[in-house]
Amino acid sequence: MAWWNALDEGGRRDWMQQAGNTGCAADAWKAYKRAAAAENWSELASKAHVVDAASRLFGARAARQLWQDLGLPPVGKSPGPPDLSLLHYVAAFVEARLVADCRVGIAARQLHKAYIEWADEMIAPRLTLTRFGLLMQKTGIRRVAGRIITYEARFK
């Protein structure tokens, strides 16, 4: 093992002691890897603490930028830009089933459920609620944010 051979006598003794004096270089290697992982977690926790403080002092945008600047790993997954090749399905659904009307609103989940039923009838792709919502923004039906997201439309 190259790592073991690169150590001097004192280094071998130290890592072997941390491994419980088993006499096996593989156990010393495992002890070394555990220590390296703990050090990495400690460094990661320190950086995350700094980002948390930046968030409280300067806001979320500054904290996100600092997170990237510190080289911390990406978190979560954004849905990304909508696949506009699917837009014609949502537009066809809107044309077939909806009328824009600012006096009423349809809850996003209810509208998505109606789309799924329509898609099954028309043999169109089923879209997730998030993807459907991203594409609905391109149809001209106004989205109203609130505790419950609604769209200013009514069913035909």
Image (cartoon, rainbow, N blue to C red):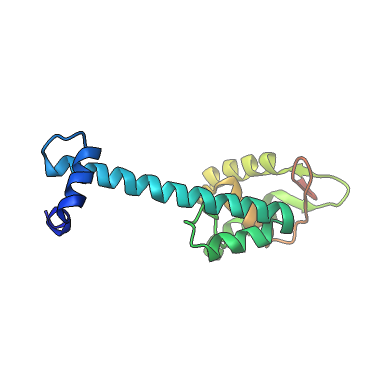
Question: Residue at the front extreme?
Answer: 10
**Is any atom of residue 83 visible in this view?**
no
Question: Residue at the right extreme?
Answer: 103
Left or right placement of residue 56 versus residue 87 in this view:
right
What residue is at 52 percent from the left and 62 percent from the top?
Answer: 70
What residue is at 58 percent from the left and 53 percent from the top?
Answer: 131
What residue is at 62 percent from the left and 40 percent from the top?
Answer: 113
Left or right placement of residue 140 versus residue 113 in this view:
right
Left or right placement of residue 137 versus residue 87 in this view:
right
Splitting the image into 4 quarters, where does residue 3 fall?
bottom left
* Residue 24 drawn at (x, y percent): 11, 40
Q: In front: 140, or 30?
A: 30
Q: In front: 68, or 108?
A: 68
* Residue 25 drawn at (x, y percent): 13, 44
Left or right placement of residue 48 versus residue 13 in this view:
right
Q: In front: 62, or 120?
A: 62
For the image, the number of numbered tags is: 0
Splitting the image into 4 quarters, where does residue 140 fall?
bottom right
**Is any atom of residue 79 visible in this view?**
yes
Q: In front: 69, or 142?
A: 69
Q: Taking 138 as reference, is 77 above or below it?
A: above
Q: Taking 96 as reference, is 28 above or below it?
A: above
* Residue 151 drawn at (x, y percent): 76, 49
